[in-house]
Amino acid sequence: MQLSHQQAVIRLEDIKAELERLGEKPELDEADEQQFDELTREFADVDAHRRQLERTAALARVRSAVKTTERGPAATQVRGERGVSYGSDSSYDADPILNPDSVEDRRFRNPWDLGEMRTFDRSPEQVGSELRSRALCAVEKMAAATDGIRSAATDIIERWDDKKGSISRLCLATSSPEYLRAWSKLAAGKGHMVSPEEQRALERAMSLTDSAGGYLVPFQLDPTVIISSDGSRNQIRQVARSVVATGDVWHGVSAGAVSWRWAAEGTEAGDNSPTFDQPTVPVYKADGFVPISIEAMDDAENVTMEVGRLLAFGKDSLEAEAFISGTGSGQPTGIVTALAGTSSEMSPGAAETFAAGDVYAMDGDLPARHRANASWLANRSIYNLIRQFDTNGGADLWERIGADVPPNLIGRPALEAEAMASGFNASADGDARVLVYGDFQNYVIADRIGMTVEFIPHLVGTNRRPTGQRGWYAWYRVGADSVLDGAFRMLNIHTSAV
């Protein structure tokens, strides 16, 4: 029996309450009779276990007292409520005030061991709550994780886990030492060295995904977590609203402003309710392939961390373009794509030209409630062009123009995106959407936690012979879209296209 003393006492109280509930019934059916008998037997077993723990603790106290006498009066003992010593030899939880290390640390000494969880008489929400507690404990203990990764993982679990603890279960299955060792061996092409215990860890993790084949990336190496903690080269991720999707589509809720009015005393209230919308963001599959020579793999000091870094870099580069110009068909909808052709698209003050007045016009046209948290987004070449508007040093478009720190444009952050248009040709046809301005909390990026990798032991050439390389084929899912176009303004230099 794996219960601690404190857990045993709690369980005895639960059984007692349930027996009393059954005993108050005027008549018990067959199922009630069977439950009553089972609870009675369990009470006897748990109570015997409790008494054994107390005897063990009492014996430890006697032994410790003898040692204390031998060492002299300087040694002291910490005692609990019932006169039982809670020294390091105790097998159950100590007083949480006098010995705070004893409660959660002893309970979740191994947070990945779900075999000690009691699930038979608990609701899914209660089980989910314990899974979250265990996952948060596992985040603190998991190997190969920086403080930033631990912080990001904690934030993901606390903000986005559902009532049943789906993300916590994934974290526990893929962050354990056994799973990390097994995954590292597979990544290095040494799958034959996986131990039975490590194989069981792999199988537990595989049972959580509906993917056919492949292995989930360890939680502490998952690119979603790494990018959240270490930052992204794609600056739109730094200001966009990031959410976690648990299905194929993320469903949100948005509403217009409530219509207030001035009302005379004693008059009937008006219908000021807002209109609610339910924006959706579909998630799409993205994949990548990382080849590596056998020699490089043998020479690498830490193949596991290198795989995680390469996967995160590739994911970030792919998304940097998709979040700007993604079509929304089989891939995320980019912010430029989302705003194209809407009322948020603006023309320049003078046809086919770009001037300082256009920048101020965008700022003035954006509603104040969105302007307070607004950011600019453009290619650096466009920002350099804006710098050249002020030839006499009087416009003061930029703050600290010499050092470019912070990179602000008329008081709002200026974000870079290489996928944005880098220039325009007044005589050319087509659109030149060079500048986006708005509150990017209304551009939602929906991530599915959990990247899967399939290890390919040998790559072959055109003649179907080995090339001396191995490979990692990885896939994950992500989506993005604007959920409120009115929170943005986008400048299109070519007025004929608007």
Image: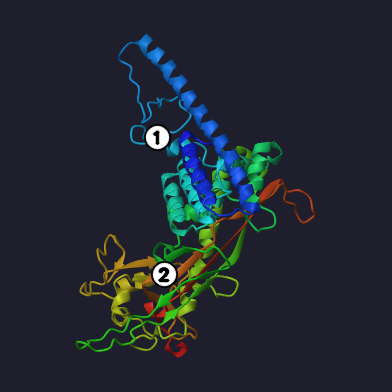
Q: Quick check: 364 above or below 231?
A: below
The one nearer the camera, 252 or 92, is 92
Q: Is residue 316 above or below residue 337?
A: above
Of badges 1 and 2, the one in the foreground is 1
Residue type, numbered disc 1: Asp
Q: Residues within 10 Å of mark 2 (few under 14, many from 20)?
A: some
Q: Which residue is mark 2?
A: 379
Q: Going by the image, does 135 lie left or right of 303?
A: left
Q: Position of residue 40 (x, y in %)?
A: 58, 41
Q: Which residue is mark 1?
A: 101
**Where the C terminus falls, by quadrant?**
bottom left
Distance of mark 1 from mark 2, alpha carbons? 53 Å
The residue at the far top in this view is 70
State the image coordinates of residue 177 (x, y, percent, origin top left): 56, 39
What amino acid type should be assigned to the residue bearing mark 2? Asn
- Residue in the picture at 57% in, 35% down: 45
Instruction: State yes or no: discs 1 and 2 in contact (Cβ < 8 Å).
Output: no
* Residue depicted at x 45% and y 90%: 496
Q: For the residue labelled by badge 1, is the local secondary structure a helix, a strand or a loop?
A: helix
The residue at 42%/37% (across/down) is 103
Say few, some or many: other residues with alpha carbon within 10 Å of mark 1 (under 14 / 14 to 19 / 20 or more): few
Give SS at disc 2.
Answer: loop
- On residue 64, which mark appears? none
Observer able to see residue 406:
yes
Viewer-side residue, 397 vs 364 = 364
Which sits earlier in the primary sequence, circle 1 or circle 2? 1
Q: Is residue 180 visible?
A: no
Pinpoint residue 219: horizontal percent, then vertical percent: 53, 49
